[in-house]
Amino acid sequence: HKILKFSPEGKLLLKFGNFGAVPGTMNSPARLTIDPQGNIYVLDYHDLNLETDPKNKIGYYRITKYDSGGNYIFDIGGTGKGDGEFYSMPNDIECDNQGNLYVLDYGNYRVQKFDPDGNFILKFGSFGKMDGQFDYPNTIAFDKSGFLYIVDTNNHRIQKFDRSGKFILKFGREGYNDGEFSYPYKLYLDKDN
């Protein structure tokens, strides 16, 4: 229930976070990303009714923004299908070079974009196999030109978009030969891309 930062030599530099479901606390931190200003976004999951009613598991999905010193700034999200809500645990989060946050909202088969103040900007994607559609989108990565790559796991492909969500291209298909994938999961871009 904490975020720890270490130096390359293994010295603890920063520790923050407490267990809980109120703003500024964490229950199950799963992913994090850092914006160009050094702010830290933490993807968190809360099982709000587990203690009071173990059979009624209603999750709460949110992303919390902290400054570089671990001080709470605000939360984004909640459970649902509306703008700024997440139907299930988002799979990945990433910031672009302008400090906008992109959330891979896989339960809604979409990507949501938020500005540095946490305001919803846009969404793109839906369920399916066509260009710009997803079936279990899993990882987000930006190249140095600002294009967004998304691993579309159950469609066995990678899709490329601009920052406004416009589809650019796709590559890969199901298989085991060169250029083919079998349920790709993660994507990493090297420093030259």
Image (cartoon, rainbow, N blue to C red):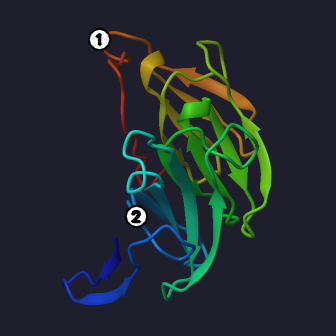
In the image, residue 89 lies at what x, y percent?
Answer: 49, 44
Residue 82, above or below 78: above
Q: Is residue 19 visible?
A: yes
Depth check: give the residue in front, 106 or 13.
Answer: 106
Label annotation for residue 152: none
Q: Which residue is mark 1?
A: 177
- For residue 27, which numbered disc appears in the image? 2
Local crowd size for mark 2, using a 10 Å CA cut-off: few (<14), some (14–19), many (≥20) = some
- Pick the front one: 105 or 9: 105
- Dots 2 and 1: beta carbons under 8 Å? no
- Which amino acid is tagged 1? Asn
Mark 2 or 1: the one toward you: 2
Mark closer to the chain start, 2 or 1: 2
- What residue is at 43 percent from the left and 19 percent from the top? 154
Place residue 55 in its image quadrant. top left
- Where is residue 90? Give x, y as percent: 51, 44
Note whether 171 is above or below 36 in the view shown.
above
Count of numbered marks = 2
Residue at point 67%, 24% (across, down): 126
Q: Secondary structure at mark 1?
A: loop
- Tag 2's secondary structure? loop
What residue do we see at 38% from left, 73% from top? 19
Q: Quadrant of residue 127?
A: top right
Residue 181 is left or right of residue 75, and the answer is: left
Q: Residue at x 48, y 84 (%)?
A: 70
What amino acid does circle 2 point to?
Answer: Asn
